C-alpha cells in the first residue's frame, strides 16, 4: 500500500482512533501518546491487511488491541497525575457528552472497547470478531454495559 493511500485511510478513520484514545486515557498527553502508538501499529501492520474485511474493521482491531496493551503498560509504569482535560477536548461539548466520558472512565477496558464500537455502529459480528467473543456474548455484554453506564451516571449524580 502506498503511503498516501495509507494516510488517506487513517485520515478517514481519525475520529475512531481519537474516541478510542479518549476512552482509555483522561490526560491529553496520554491520549496523544496512544494516538501515535496506534498510528505506528497501523503502519507497521498494514502489510498484513489483506482486504478480507473492511479497513475500518481491521483498523478497529489494531487500535483496540494497541490501546489495551498500551493501557496495561502505562498503568504499571506511572502514577496518575491530574492535568489538563483530554485529547481534542472542546469546551463547547454538550453536557451529555461530558457526562458520558465521565461515566466511561468507570468501565473496564473490555467494556470500553465494546461500547466505542457499538456507538460507532459496528455490527455485532464485527464487534465479536474484533474482541474475539461470540455475537451472542456481544449482545449480552452491550446490554450490561449500557445498563452499567446508566447506573454509574445515577450513582455519581452526573445527571443534569
Image (cartoon, helix red, strand yellow):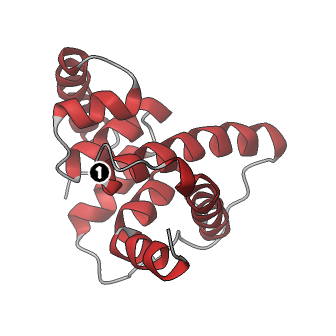
Residue 84, placed above or below residue 144: below
Work out whether residue 108 can be spotted: no
Residue 108, placed above or below residue 2: above
Residue 102: percent from the left, percent from the top? Answer: 39, 52
Residue 6, placed above or below residue 65: below
Residue at 40% in and 79% down? 8
Front residue of 14/144: it is 14
Residue 5, placed above or below residue 113: below
Residue 21: percent from the left, percent from the top? Answer: 50, 58
Residue at 39% in and 47% down? 58
What SS does tag 1 mark? loop
- Quadrant location of the C terminus? bottom left
Front residue of 98/117: it is 117
Q: Is residue 11 left or right of residue 2?
A: left
Front residue of 62/87: it is 62
Residue 52: percent from the left, percent from the top? Answer: 32, 43
Determine which quarter of the picture holds residue 150.
Answer: top left
Front residue of 43/126: it is 43
CA neighbours of label 1 inside 10 A, class few (<14), some (14 to 19), many (20+):
some
The residue tagged 1 is: 158
Residue at 54% in and 78% down? 3
Work out whether residue 85 can be spotted: yes
Residue at 49% in and 82% down? 4
Q: How many marks?
A: 1
Determine which quarter of the picture holds residue 146.
Answer: top left
Residue 111: percent from the left, percent from the top? Answer: 38, 32
Amino acid at each position: 500500500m502506498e503511503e498516501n493511500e495509507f494516510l488517506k485511510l487513517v485520515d478517514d478513520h481519525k475520529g475512531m482512533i481519537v474516541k478510542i484514545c479518549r476512552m482509555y486515557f483522561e490526560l491529553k498527553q496520554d491520549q496523544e501518546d496512544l494516538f501515535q502508538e496506534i498510528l505506528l501499529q497501523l503502519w507497521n501492520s498494514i502489510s498484513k491487511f489483506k482486504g478480507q474485511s473492511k479497513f475500518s474493521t481491521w483498523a478497529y482491531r489494531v487500535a483496540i488491541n494497541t490501546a489495551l496493551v498500551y493501557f496495561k503498560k502505562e498503568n504499571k509504569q506511572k502514577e496518575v497525575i491530574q492535568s489538563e482535560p483530554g485529547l481534542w477536548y472542546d469546551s463547547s461539548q454538550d453536557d451529555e457528552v461530558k457526562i458520558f466520558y465521565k461515566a466511561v472512565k468507570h468501565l473496564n477496558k473490555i467494556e470500553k472497547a465494546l461500547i466505542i464500537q457499538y456507538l460507532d455502529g459496528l455490527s455485532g459480528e464485527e464487534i465479536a470478531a474484533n474482541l474475539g467473543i461470540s455475537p451472542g456474548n456481544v449482545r449480552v455484554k452491550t446490554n450490561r454495559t449500557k445498563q452499567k453506564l446508566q447506573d454509574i451516571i445515577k450513582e455519581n449524580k452526573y445527571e443534569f
